[in-house]
Amino acid sequence: MPSATPQTRTIAIVGRPNVGKSAIFNRLLRRRLAIVHDEAGVTRDRIVAEAEWGDERFTLIDTGGIGLMDRAREGDEIAAAARVQVEAALDDAAAVILVVDTQAGVMPLDQEVARLLRARARPVLVAANKADHPRHDDAADEFARLGFPVFPVSALHNRGFDDLMEAAIPHLPPPPPAEVLKAPLVVTVAGRPNAGKSSYINRMLNRERLVVSSVPGTTRDSIEVPFTVGSGPQARRYLLVDTAGMRPARRVDTAVEKFSLIRVEEAVRRSDVVVLLFDALQGPTRQDKRIADLVMESRRGCILVVNKWDLAGKMKQDEYREAVRRELPFLDFAPMHFISAKTGGGVEATIESFDRVAAQISMTFTTGVLNRVLHDLFDKKSPPSVKGRRLKLYYATQIGTRPLRLKMFVNDPDLVVPAYRKFLEKRLREKFGLEGAPLVFLFAARERGE
């Protein structure tokens, strides 16, 4: 039975593979979020982003190409899962843009997608893509037999989108009353291929939001998924980012995979908190250490999640935790959770960690208290002598959050040795908590008379 039109301001982009859905998604979004490539099937999950057109704000969804017809043999696990993702996107959408290729004409799979959309009873507009010149517009008329309004467009040359969106926007429900919403906490889930990142996010959402397959490399894009816990003014809002599994650089052998790795790095750098997820049976590998290095370089909040703990047998968490700390000593400040994305065990506790780490990376130190604590540390343990001179602290102040940044005015920054910097960091963490929060020290010489 057709489902009722949802009361959400959402437009879904659908169509068969390789007709330019992601290029149109990027064009409407006015930024490159989805990977665009000639290889068919690059997009597998549905990609969600907030978009603006004129004065209108709405949610835009890019979907994987529908490459599995009902009458086709369903032997492709990933294609079948991508089809499920398209149907889920249609459940969320108030209007649908069906993308076709004017240069190829009406294909049997275009008709199959149109049949699927008619059964859903959603308002549908056909974006006849690759109409790169006005002389190509007449070729778009052929698609009128699909039964929906047709709009010639060109993602390559940015043609025809004003007319398309002018027809699409009226199908959206009225916007909700204006209210001030805090920006969502951006949580990026990173790790090796097949560690269970998509399964972990699906478990948090209690739905099959992301394509999950035993085939490594199923996720290519960095997928953004809005996630809310609670309701009303007290609701906790997150943007979960599922990333492609990071393989060793020497094994990245296609352009799509190279783009995917770039997206992982971009996602880590713009996140508030990074969940480094790895397989309990494998432990932290060389590739996990590479991801951990990226997290440290980017100064992001961090949580360590050990997945597939239900398969760990008689291993003890305390012993495993110590082993991980030895492998990743520079992340000893990150909380560690043991979970099973398959059964759901331990997953809820990781969500609570998001909020704790978010609070820590946003902490504001009282200047007086900060200076008292630091001077006490200098008194209890003097800095080592360097060529007959010792480091002296005059004054400290906080100059930023996310990451926490402390500026220390001293007699000579060259007298700061790594071991003493580590000592100060460790003791400040003990005093203020700072679980999962990177801490940046900036040492500056105080001018004479300052």
Image (cartoon, rainbow, N blue to C red):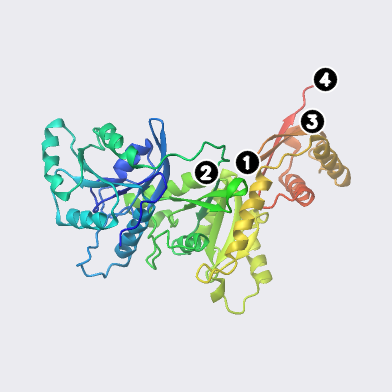
Instruction: Kindly identify the amino acid type of the residue bearing the numbered disc 3.
Output: Asn
Position of residue 394 measured from the top left corner of the image (x, y, whole percent) = 82, 32
- Identified at 15% across, 31% down, the residue is 134
In depth, the one of 360 and 139 nearer the eye is 139
Disc 3/disc 4 C-alpha distance (Å)? 12 Å
Q: What residue does disc 1 label? A: 402
Residue depth check, mark 1 versus mark 4: number of the one nearer the observer: 1
Instruction: Kindly identify the amino acid type of the residue bearing the numbered disc 4.
Output: Gly
- The kind of secondary structure element at disc 4 is loop
Q: Is residue 233 left or right of residue 16?
A: right
Q: Is residue 282 above or below residue 360?
A: below
Q: What residue does disc 2 label? A: 269
- Identified at 80% across, 39% down, the residue is 370
- Identified at 68% across, 54% down, the residue is 333
Q: Is residue 168 left or right of residue 209?
A: left
| Between discs 2 and 4, the one toward the N terminus | 2
In depth, the one of 212 and 329 nearer the eye is 212
Disc 1/disc 3 C-alpha distance (Å)? 27 Å
